[in-house]
Image (tube, helix red, strand yellow):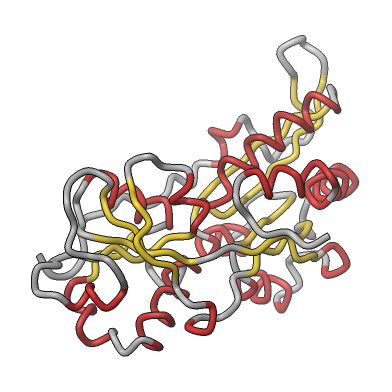
């Protein structure tokens, strides 16, 4: 199969997050609660969910609502006025674009973590893919990558394939996905022969197997960044949550989930 699999666009219904545009909501106990809305790259799902639970436990008057998608898609949502307080991107470019348009508080912008890019195949069954060069084999029919225009992992993957001289051989086999987690899902289901994801994504699934790591020199450094959105309805609450993510609890959670963290 050439081209792309039919894919569903990420759900952008922020209203389903519990009316996140209203910063004062009613919690389960009936008391008013401050809601902090976080837009985070798909690859951060487990760590953000864990940190949200920890933050809520330590701050009973606050509820954290998270929205996950490709970093580029999340940046476009913010540009279009989505009610977001904190943005966590898997690459610097989406954050750069927002900063250039005056949509984030540049004083709040910080490097969050790093990651590695890996090649994965379905865990079940034999695979002819043992390294990146094998993606050119005739036996390999479909290779999943993130859509490079909006998915940082897809952009990094394209850089790696180009650096290894594999672009022309792999391009006809590419199946594009709307997020790195969708790439992972394609590999898990056996819809494709291989996919390129972050190491942390592969570690979160028992249904894929890592066969190779992309040399760091083949792609730009993978850098996650965090910032408070200027249009936040509660900048103080947003800043406090961002500080928590950047603090000891956040660094520990990131390390537990396989991200590289300095300090």
Q: Quadrant of residue 144?
A: bottom left
| 224 relative position to 189: left or right | right
| 208 relative position to 155: left or right | left
Which residue is painted at 75% across and 58% down in the image?
229
Q: Is residue 203 above or below residue 165?
A: above
Residue 112 in the image: state x and y as whole percent.
Answer: 73, 60
Q: Quadrant of residue 176?
A: bottom left
Which residue is painted at 34% across and 61% down in the image?
211
| 57 relative position to 129: left or right | right
Which residue is painted at 26% across and 61% down in the image?
194
Residue 140 in the image: state x and y as whole percent.
Answer: 15, 67
Which residue is more in the foreground, 5 or 186? 186
Image quarter (top left, top right, bottom left or bottom right) of the C terminus: bottom right
Which residue is painted at 31% across and 50% down in the image?
8
Residue 178 in the image: state x and y as whole percent.
Answer: 38, 58
Which residue is more in the foreground, 167 or 126? 126
Q: Is residue 35 above or below residue 197?
A: above
* Image mark count: 0
Which residue is more in the foreground, 222 or 79? 222
| 256 relative position to 138: left or right | right
Image quarter (top left, top right, bottom left or bottom right) of the N terminus: bottom left
Residue 90 in the image: state x and y as whole percent.
Answer: 59, 63
Q: Is residue 90 above or below residue 170?
A: above
Q: Residue furthest top?
A: 29
Which residue is more in the foreground, 136 or 6? 136
């Amino acid at each position: 199969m050439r081209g792309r699999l039919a894919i569903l666009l990420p759900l952008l219904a922020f209203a389903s997050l519990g009316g996140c545009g209203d910063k004062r909501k009613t919690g389960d106990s009936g008391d008013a609660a401050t809601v902090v809305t976080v837009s985070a790259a798909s690859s951060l799902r487990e760590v953000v969910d864990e940190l949200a639970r920890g933050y809520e436990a330590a701050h009973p008057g606050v509820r954290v609502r998270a929205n996950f998608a490709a970093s580029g898609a999340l940046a476009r949502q913010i540009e279009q006025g989505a009610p977001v307080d904190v943005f966590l991107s898997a690459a610097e470019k989406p954050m750069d674009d927002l900063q250039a348009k005056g949509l984030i508080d540049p004083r709040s912008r910080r490097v969050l973590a790093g990651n590695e890019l890996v090649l994965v195949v379905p865990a079940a069954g034999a695979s002819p893919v043992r390294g990146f060069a094998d993606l050119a084999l005739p036996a390999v029919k479909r290779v999943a990558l993130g859509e490079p225009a909006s998915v940082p992992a897809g952009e990094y993957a394209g850089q790696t394939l180009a650096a290894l001289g594999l672009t022309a051989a792999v391009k006809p086999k590419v199946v594009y996905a709307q997020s790195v987690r969708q790439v992972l899902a394609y590999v898990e289901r056996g819809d494709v022969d291989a996919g390129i994801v972050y190491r942390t994504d592969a570690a979160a699934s028992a249904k894929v197997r890592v066969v190779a790591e992309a040399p760091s020199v083949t792609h730009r450094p993978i850098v996650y960044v965090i910032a408070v959105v200027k249009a936040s309805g509660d900048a103080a609450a947003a800043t406090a949550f961002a500080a928590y993510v950047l603090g000891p609890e956040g660094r520990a959670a990131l390390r537990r989930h396989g991200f590289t963290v300095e300090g």
